[in-house]
Image: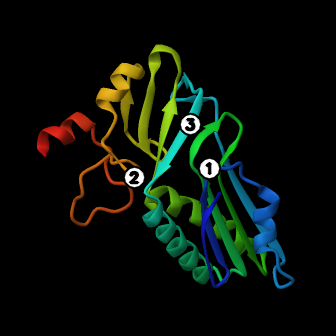
Amino acid sequence: MAKELEDDGCYIALTDDLLDAKSMMDRVRSPKAGAIVLFAGTTRDNFGGKPVKELQYTSYEPRALQTMLKICKEVKEKHSLTSIAMIHRLGVVPIGEESILIAVSSPHRQAAWKAGEEALEECKEKVEVWKKEEFGGDEGGVWRANRDGAAGVRIDGEQKASEDKPKSGPHGPILRPGRPGERGHGPVVHPNKLLKTQ
């Protein structure tokens, strides 16, 4: 079941379900739009030369929804879009399945292309979603901010995972202490260092 918000041609959602590209395109379809651009981010089978078994996403949902809506409104206004829709999947996302869909419609294709890419970059930089890359076997997994190239917190096996996993609230792990003026996910900090400073 999706947690969703909709306002003035902007639709955003978080869900544990499979993502449906056609329904997202239908959300932005309009007789005023001459272009619809859809971005689908999928789980690949490797990261940094290591085989990836699956990704797991968690989020601070109330904040993530508000951040997603703000991004969509700003991108819609900046590029004079007809409509924009963004949905992010949470939980386990197997190889080859989508973790995010962004659909934008506009009168002309150039604005749609630019807006789709900008919405994705803003989402990766600012939305309160974290991912765990599960490598399988003895390799364990790594929690990281949902950005390309973000540093991660390694989780070694089940026993070690329970000891080292970041403290969790009702919406998933807290991977960083708050810092004045920090934007987006902020630095990812090893949880043992967090415990020592508190």
Q: Position of residue 100 (x, y in %)?
A: 63, 53
Relative horizontal placement of residue 23, taking residue 161 as reference (left or right): right
Q: Quadrant of residue 75?
A: bottom right
Asked whether the viewer can see residue 114, the reply is no
Q: Earlier in the sequence, mark 1 or mark 2?
A: 1
What's under tag 2, amino acid-wise? Pro
In the picture of the structure, the residue carrying the numbered disc 1 is 16
Mark 1: few, some, or many residues within 10 Å (few <14, many ≥20)? some
Q: Nearer the viewer, mark 1 or mark 3?
A: 1
Kindly identify the amino acid type of the residue bearing the numbered disc 1.
Answer: Asp
Q: Residue at x 39, y 60 (%)?
A: 184
Using the image as rendered, state which of residue 189 and residue 7 is in the foreground. 7
Residue 143 position within the rendered picture, expressed as x and y whole percent measured from the top left: 42, 37
Q: Does residue 119 appear in this view?
A: yes
Residue 171's x, y, as percent? 42, 53
At horizontal 37% and vertical 39% (from top left) the residue drawn is: 151
Q: What residue did someone put label 2 on?
A: 170
| Separation (CA) of disc 1 from disc 3 | 13 Å
| Residues packed near mark 2 inside 10 Å, few (<14), some (14 to 19) or many (20 plus) | few
- Tell me how the rendering is colored: rainbow
Q: Which residue is mark 3?
A: 55
Residues marked 1 and 2 touching at CB (< 8 Å): no
Which of the pair 77/86 is nearer the observer? 86
Query: Between marks 3 and 2, how big is the CA–CA gap?
Result: 20 Å
The amino acid sitting under disc 3 is Leu
Under circle 1, the secondary element is loop
Sooner in the amino-acid sequence: mark 3 or mark 2: 3
Quarter of the view holding residue 60: bottom left
Q: Nearer the viewer, mark 3 or mark 2?
A: 2
